[in-house]
Amino acid sequence: MMRRADNPAALGYVGSSPGVKRLDSDAWFTPPQYIEAAREVLDGIGFDPYSSDDAQRLVRADQYCTLDNPNPTRGVSWPKTRSCWMNPPYSGKPALDAATRFLEALAYERFERGIVLVNNATETRMFRALAAQARAICFTDHRIQFYNADGKKVTGNTRGQAFLYFDQLSYSQSFSDAFRQFGTVMRPL
């Protein structure tokens, strides 16, 4: 008799293909209600710098970069666009690099408005760097249930999230209007 543990097809984690061991902690896809809110605030999504072909079925950015096509990687070479949506890598140095590149692109006026989704880990350098430049922050009142590339919910999210809003011109009430349904919206002093 074959035990469940002896069957590789039964050992895949939620969202993986049976028998394929693929643990990519940075491939968590944003659920549609948050993408729709971002699209509303940004009047469409011009650029998604940390994405995948699978994610773009929902995000539908005018331009995006994947691991296979990582350029542009530095802020100064990002395409000039009206808006940027970013759900960056969350682990270690890639996370801080993503935040740095986003802020460089903002400083070089490569986009007018942007929204970044990150863990609400306020003690991290990544969060602090982004929050220092944000016009507003939505701290979710729940943990987001992300999806994998195959559309299955990823279980075990142990952290809360925050959406940070950036605008080259001024604060837009549309961010508060669209995101307060997900949690508390605050504007830094």
Image: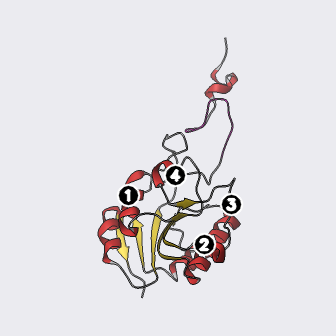
**Residue at 46% from the left image edge and 63% from the top image edge:** 45
First reached walking from the N terminus: tag 4 or tag 1: 1
First reached walking from the N terminus: tag 2 or tag 1: 1
Specify the segment rendered in magenta: 14-23
- Residue 160, position in %: x, y? 47, 61
**Residue at 50% from the left image edge and 46% from the top image edge:** 147
Please name which of the two marks, 2 or 1, marks the residue nearer to the observer: 1
Q: The residue tagged with tag 3: helix, strand or loop?
A: loop
- Residue 109, position in %: x, y? 54, 81
Please name which of the two marks, 3 or 2, marks the residue nearer to the observer: 3
First reached walking from the N terminus: tag 3 or tag 4: 4
Q: According to the image, label 2 marks what residue? A: 99
- Amino acid at dot 1: Glu
Asked if the residue under mark 1 is in contact with the one under mark 4, i.e. CB atoms within 8 Å, the reply is: no
Q: According to the image, label 4 marks what residue? A: 56
Which label belongs to residue 70? 3
Q: In whole angstroms, how far apart are the C-alphas of marks 4 and 2?
A: 21 Å
Mark 3 neighbour class, 10 Å CA radius: few under 14, some 14 to 19, many 20 or more: few
